[in-house]
Image: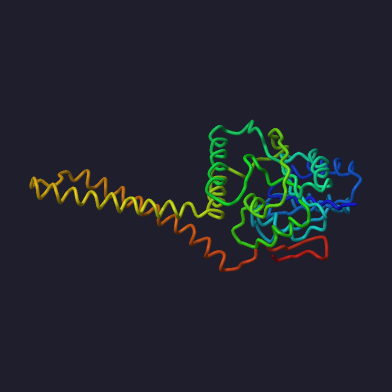
Amino acid sequence: MKKISIIVPCFNEEESVPLFYSEVTSVLKGLHTDYEIIFIDDGSEDKTFQTIKKISEKDKHVLYLSFSRNFGKESAMLAGFCNCHGDYITVMDADLQDPPSLLPEMIGYLDSGEYDSAAARRVTRKGEPPIRSWFARMFYKLINRFSDADIMDGARDYRLMKREMVEAVIAMSEYNRFSKGIFGWVGFRTKWLPYENVERAAGETKWGFWKLFRYALDGIINFSQAPLNIASWMGTIMTIVSFIAIVFIVIRKLLFGDPVAGWASTICIIVFIGGIQLMILGIIGKYLSKTYLEVKNRPHFIISEANFTDAKKIG
């Protein structure tokens, strides 16, 4: 009998945690299999951790890890992977936007032996602002075009994986983590399960537009050298254009004795070229900052409290 581990990153999910626990346990009990639910409190500022502890006191299947501060969802997911005990492992959001009702179907695909993971993808974005949906679609197109990570449009972190795949994900120990890209990069046979978008059960989203934009930008930088290549090509093109302009000015001066007039056009060109240079420096700076964080070799997470003895508290 396979044991299932449910990893649940939580940040200020005081209202959602009881609702999630109730729904996911009703599904798991119907499967008649061993399971564990690992809540990771990611430095919440409300009573999320106290709520989790109360639930764990009543249910031995509930384990928890509490971070010493907020490390982010990526670190919470990694902490769950490093501390789970199941044969099948999944990540689920506490807000119930990842439907627990998909779990039986996911388990069926893994039990068949044909797939190593079963992943959920949203086929609609009902309830999202149109501009956010448009940027999301563009992100998936760009990252699949310019990187070696295979990311399905609408992919969620919600997927059930065999232990072998999780070990491969843990082995990718980079500090700047982008799990959607990592899941695609490690490969393995994946079955995609489409589902309609589900609204949050309670509370408010922690992912605003700009936070999602930065997350998407990090994903592209983590898995693609395209921005550096673009910067290089832009520099080359501007050098060619500048050389042609110089030749044109010299010839015009020699033949007609009339240099190109107009300080406004000159200023515009200087500002334009200066802007491109700053943008290129910014792209290089992003890659340099990522490298700087990697070589520091700092831990991804620090756990201050857990309710099981074999917990890996620093990783």
Q: Is residue 308 left or right of residue 210?
A: right
- Camera-nearest residue between 16 and 292: 292
In percent of the image, x 73 and y 65: which residue is there?
A: 313
**Where residue 155 sits: x, y (%)?**
66, 42
Q: Position of residue 223 (x, y in %)?
A: 56, 54
**At x 61% / y 44%, what residue is drawn?**
207
Q: Position of residue 105 (x, y in %)?
A: 81, 40
Res 315 → quadrant: bottom right
Q: Residue at x 19, y 51 (%)?
A: 247
116 up-or-down from 290: above or below: above
Q: Residue at x 70, y 33 (%)?
A: 196
Residue, far front? 114
- Picture colour scheme: rainbow
Q: Quadrant of residue 204?
A: top right
Instruction: Determine whether, in the image, residue 255 is placed left or right of residue 270.
Output: left
Which residue extends farthest bottom? 296
Q: How many marks?
A: 0
- Nearest the camera: 251 or 289? 251
Q: Is residue 288 above or below residue 110?
A: below
The image shows residue 191 at horizontal and vertical percentages of 73, 43
Residue closest to the far left: 257
Q: Is residue 137 left or right of residue 203?
A: left
**Residue 298 in the image: above or below residue 99:** below
